[in-house]
Amino acid sequence: MAEAILSAVSKIGIVSLNKTVTIVVDQLAKKVNGLIELPVKIKMIDKELRMMNSVIQDLGAIYLSHNVIKEWIAGVRNLAYHVEDVIDKYSYEALKVSEDANLYRYALGGSRHIMAFTKIVDEVIEIEMEIRQVIQNQSYWNNIVDPIKNYREEIDRRRGMACFPELYSDEDLVGIDENRNKLTGWLSTNEKECTVIAISGMGGLGKTTLVKTVYNREKSNFPGAHAWLVVSQSYDAVDLLVELLRKIGHTQPFTAGAKPDVYELTDAIQKTLEDRKCLIVLDDVWDKEAYTWTCSAFQGLQGSRVIITTRKEDVAALAHKGRRMKLQPLGKDESFKLFCSRTFHNKSPDRKCPPGLQTVAAAIAERCNGLPLAIIACGSLLSTKQPTDHAWNYMYNHLRSYLQENDHVRAILLLSYHDLSAVLVNCFLYCTLFPEDYPIPRETLVRMWVAEGFAITKDCSTAEEVAEEILMELISRNMLEVVETDELSRVTTCKMHDIVRVLALHIAKQQRFGSANDESEMMLMDREVRRFSTCGWKREGSSPAAAGVEFPRLRTFMGIASSTSMISSILNGSNYLTVLELQDSAISHVPATIGNLFNLHYIGLRRTNVQSLPDSIEKLSNLETLDIKRTKIEKLPPGIVKLEKLRHLFADRFSDEKQTDFRYFGVEAPKMISNCQDLQTLETISASKDLSQQLKEMTKLQTVWIDNINASNCEELFDALSHMPLLSSVLLSASDEKETLSLEALKPISTRFHRLIIRGSWVHGILKCPIFHGHARSLKYLALSWCNLGTEDPLQLLASQLPSLTYLSLDRVSSAAILILSDGCFAKLRTLVLKNMPNVKQLVIQDNAIPSIDGIYIKSLPEMNKVPHRIEYLGSLKKLWLLDLHKDFKADWNLNQMHNELKHVPELRL
């Protein structure tokens, strides 16, 4: 696939610009036959790969229909992987030579270096032979491309037709009543202008089914004309408009032998529909242009309605915000009802599930994760089987493989996959490495994509910014789902729908991209795998260390929550490892051999028991991300300042897991940390005498967390922070709970500044400081803890100063007994957290306060004995936690029948 070529040419580009490689080649050229020609040969390989990439892009999805082309593509993929391996080896050996102080002695002959470069030259010759073979094999299919293309276009259209209407029946219309009523209402309004309506969502959610139902019922209300057009991926604008003309009753022929142009057709449609109220459905629209060509013909038509169904949110955005509907997966009850409706339609009049099968039936329906297409496919299959425990449990256990092989499910979901570019494919398949239902953190995913080279610096955008654009593109295509967003409405966590992941895992394994071992079957792992993840091995004997397995091609290893001592095997046998993610694993020691992994860009040790890092880490010259958050590490190796490419350093920890003590532990910053000029993230370091001077030299910092601040050094530190041009997020923690911080010197010049976290006591009048005045509009996130406000109400104080807050957290903040959210205050606030506030007895929410609130989390307020006043009127509330309150709180809750009053809140914890 083109995505494999993309990785190879990216590596070639990097090595071609590497001055170290050039110097080493010049020095060893006389001792290694053919080495002097190597740079030229690599450039020629690059050109050939790019040409093959162009051929594949021109083919599009055609190869799926022909085995010869599939085999040729597989050959190209293997070639690209071979090139990537050799280029990585080339870089590695050049780095080893450059580090060797005795280069002259080794260069005289017989050294390991000369043997290594001789082998590289030989492998490049092998690659040249492989290229010739791939070019020769292309002749097998060159003459059959056009017929296949025509065939593929026809299949594409047939596949898009009503999304396989034979799968659906009236009984399958479960859970669409609300959406059907809303769509019907939009069609029947008295709006005189032509209105565009968009129905969006991932493949298989029933967009077409919903619209088809409403269309069939409502088309009689549009006597002027009505038409249903399937656009699909392989549409032709002229053919589409000709089909529309035919369906609206245009009979006048065009000039014989001449194909009409788009403008001629548009004019004909407008004349035909003049003064007629019409209903047009554009089903399965994949790009804005398809809409533009057709909808330009409807402009000015009084009272007409155009409905678009699409998987892409940028297409849906063509409709007015009030006329967009994004379909979501069915809920648990609706899924079960739909499953039973399809499964028992020929077995019982009431379509009810027999009592003995309800448990397994519910499990099957739930495993389809609310995707109607998958539920119907499973139900249809089981409707032909005997209703026995054995048959149904077998279905449950083999559900993944069934959905993976089901033609209807594959065809509909793979349409979205084959519409992705090579870059998007790499990033999409990478998400399969995370466990099922795992909420993938945006920042982690972005850093991994950058480490793998899937996102690179582009124009004025950093690699991380490019990666975030890729993430939003996948989300807009409904390939990934948003789980949570932050104070800036950015995605915080996302996930892949389970059914989509099943198919994506199959593709990733088939294309040798990677593999995820959800079932802990390590013995079946292909040693040639390039990326793999495991959620933990069930048996010690299943680990690669115990089995003696090495993975020489490995680029990414994710051992999330792994409980075995596999790290030595991974480090010793995977020389080109790029991403090492071991968060939540049981490891307590990092071997010094990690310093040999020159290609390592990302190390994740979050929430492990590691107590120190080896000094050899200073050799990881390509390291970009080091995550040792919540480990036992107190001090960084001094050599870390040699890592000039380091961009993200996470090193904060707590003195106790429950965070009941004040002290927040950062690591001791090594001297000359300013050598790491590319650092964007620095969390968390302890304040020191020279830290402020170091920070002044680090102009790329965006996030800075500092611990152990005292009154004597806070002014210099805050001044240094103020002059950072890109600063966006700051944490300031005092040295102890009695230390008083003054924020007078904190005056950020950055226009990106929006997040402030303060731990420690305030000086009097702190809300009058510049940070709360000059940044009152830009400050979105504020978290205060261990702050002494006496008897004042912090909510009223902050509401008057910070109207733009979307997140507010108060933890161990002394205050008045009654907290009041005043009328109209915090209009943008989405999250409110109140914790460990011993004086608070009551929370009063006045009219129109916090109208946008999404979550309220109240915990450990021992004196609160009453339900927050008027909380039941917060219509936007989705999450409400009321934990560890006064013993009388529950009685007041029951007395006011709050469970009934708050049944609109999906997540309620007491």
Image: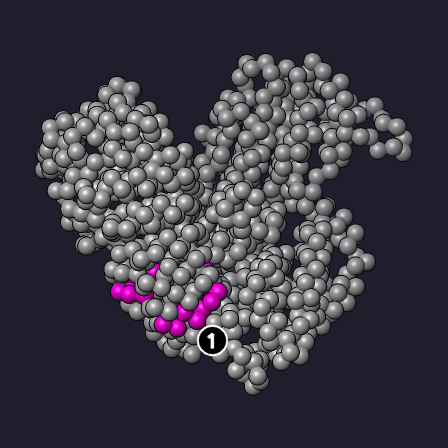
Q: Position of residue 660 (x, y in %)?
A: 16, 48
Q: Would residue 512 be counted in the magenta stretch? A: no
Location of residue 402 with respect to 881 vertically, above or below: below
Q: Is residue 822 at least partly visible in the picture?
A: yes
Quadrant of the rendering where the N terminus is positioned: bottom right
Q: Quadrant of the C terminus?
A: top left
Residue 479 image point, x, y percent: 51, 46
Q: Position of residue 771 (x, y in %)?
A: 29, 31
Residue 497 lies, in percent from the top left, at 46, 48
> Going 30% across and 46% down the picture, which residue do you hit?
692
Question: In the current view of this chain or complex, which residue is farthest to the right?
Answer: 256
Residue 897 visible in image: no
Residue that appears at 56% across and 46% down: 458
Q: Answer left or right for 617 relative to 553.
A: left
Q: Nearer the viewer, residue 683 or 83?
A: 683
Mark 1 sits on what residue?
101
Residue 608 falls inside the magenta stretch? yes
Q: Observer-nearest residue: 146 or 25?
A: 25
Work out whether 273 lies above or below 104: above
Q: Residue at x 76, y 18 (%)?
A: 271
Magenta stretch bounds: 592-613
- Report the predominant secondary structure element of the magenta stretch: loop
